Image (tube, rainbow, N blue to C red):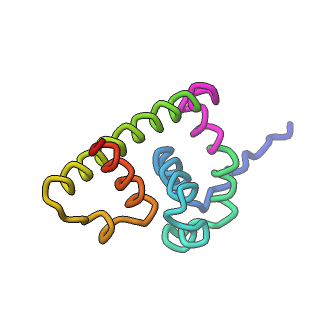
Amino acid sequence: MDTQKTQACRKRNGKQVSFDFKLSLIDEISNGLISANYASKKYNISRSTIAYWIKKLSCFEQTKEGMSKNDEIKKLKERIEELEFIKDFQQDMIAEFEKVTGEELSKKFLPEHLAKEIQRKKKKLTK
């Protein structure tokens, strides 16, 4: 009878990294904090491995958020409205401050288009 010899399993030469590390690395690369080439050198991981992780796990990042495009657009519109309200409030406060003190600080320290908006608000306040 022939006996079959069992062959040893091929050993992996690569180091194992955690799933969280892979996600954080992909997040850093996608946000532009580091490049894939720099990450490759820094963590001693091949660029092809990083490209593979990005290909496989970038979809995971998107599904993890679980937000549809319409929900995201709605959320961003709400954020825009909130920021516009804050901007208007701050401009009103600056205009009121300049009216009380008599100093025109907005022309010195703010960009031209914002200074013009504050001047318009000051004119509205005087009416």
* Image coords of residue 61 (percent x, y): 57, 39
Residue drawn 50% across and 30% down? 75
Residue drawn 30% across and 71% down? 108
Position above or below: 104 against 66:
below
Query: Magenta segment range?
Result: 58-72
* Image coords of residue 90 (percent x, y): 29, 47
Who is closer to the viewer here, 11 or 53? 53
Who is closer to the viewer here, 10 or 45? 45
Q: Quadrant of the C terminus?
A: top left
Residue drawn 59% across and 32% down? 73
Q: Quadrant of the N terminus?
A: top right
Tell me if 68 is positioned left or right of 19 in this view.
right
67 within the magenta span: yes
| Secondary structure predominantly adopted by residues drawn in magenta | helix
* Image coords of residue 65 (percent x, y): 53, 32
Tell me if 25 is positioned left or right of 97 in this view.
right
* Image coords of residue 49 (percent x, y): 65, 59
Residue 46: name its quadrant: bottom right
93 within the magenta span: no
Position above or below: 76 against 97:
above
Who is closer to the viewer here, 52 or 90? 90
